[in-house]
Image (tube, rainbow, N blue to C red):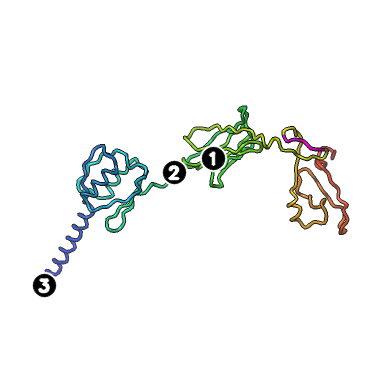
Amino acid sequence: MKSNHFLVRWLCVALFVLFAWNIQAQITVDVKNEPLKEVLKQIERSSKYSFFYNVELEGLDKLVTIKTDNASLEETMKQLLKGTNITFEKKVDNVVVLLPRQKTAKESRAISGKVVDGNGDAIIGASIIVKGSSVGTSTDVNGNFTIDHVSGQAMLVVSSIGYKKEEVAVTGGTPVEIRLSEDSNLMDEVVVVGYGVQKKINLTGSVVSVDHDVLANRPIANVTTGLQGLLPGVSIVNTTSRPGDNNSSIRVRGVGTLNNS
């Protein structure tokens, strides 16, 4: 009795394994140069699998040639989707969902190029940012730049003071030349200097400014002490600590020069 019971259990296990194997190895297809979406329909008619996908999924019109005999789903899909950006996921009840393959880090690359003006001269210190991210860099003294790990569908946002901002699509792996045009509106702005008013386009000296909002947010007793540490090249030293007493010394580029000149 025990031996018969063991034999029955062994037959049940064998039948289950054979049934499971038949469920997995049930795709037979033989096509040549037919669109992928048509091949999927043939597999649906001749197997228990159902495919779900977006009709606008890129790669469905790709011509494929495949010949299988009782192949597994994984083996069949590996051949069908080879050379496409489509992947698949098997769901319950033999439902197969087709999805676009996600970009991986290996598909990113380094992008290099040069930023120039309308005359072809290099723009130093131009900002290059990958749109929608914090990844970026700036150009060197020759206008050249390099950004690592940029995807093939990224956009570069290029900007520099006095020039119009440009957005450039990343294409290919060769160095790109980005040409910025001058922003005439910015060049027509005026700057108030200590001895009058000049246009930016005619200004050759160094000009710095402090917004009034910055001063309003500082706990200061007078404007002089409020400017401390805000203006490059300007040294402000207060020689007294008495409240309300403004006895500060202001030196413009007068500290650290040769012989304190």
Q: CA distance from mark 1 to mark 2?
A: 20 Å
Q: Nearer the viewer, residue 172 or 38?
A: 38
Q: Mark 1 vs mark 2: which is more N-terminal?
A: 2
Residue 204 point in image, percent of width and height: 75, 33
Residue 221 point in image, percent of width and height: 82, 56
Q: Residue furthest bottom?
A: 1
In the displayed structure, does residue 128 sit left or right of residue 44? right
Q: Secondary structure at mark 1?
A: strand
Q: Are marks 2 and 3 in contact (CB under 8 Å)?
A: no
Badge 3 crowding class, 10 Å Cα cut-off, few under 14, some 14 to 19, many 20 or more, is few
Observer-side mark, 2 or 3, equals 2
Report the magenta stretch's main SS. Answer: strand
Q: CA distance from mark 2 to mark 3?
A: 62 Å
Segment tinted magenta in the rendering: 196-200
Q: Mark 2 vs mark 3: which is more N-terminal?
A: 3
Q: Quadrant of residue 258?
A: top right
Disc 2: which residue: 106
Disc 3: which residue: 1
Vertical side of 225 occupied by 81: above or below:
above
Observer-side mark, 1 or 2, equals 1
Q: Are marks 1 and 2 in contact (CB under 8 Å)?
A: no
Residue 181, magenta (yes or no): no
Q: Amino acid at mark 3?
A: Met
For the N terminus, the quadrant is bottom left
Vertical side of 50 occupied by 6: above or below:
below
Q: Secondary structure at mark 3?
A: loop
Q: Amino acid at mark 1?
A: Leu
Disc 1: which residue: 156
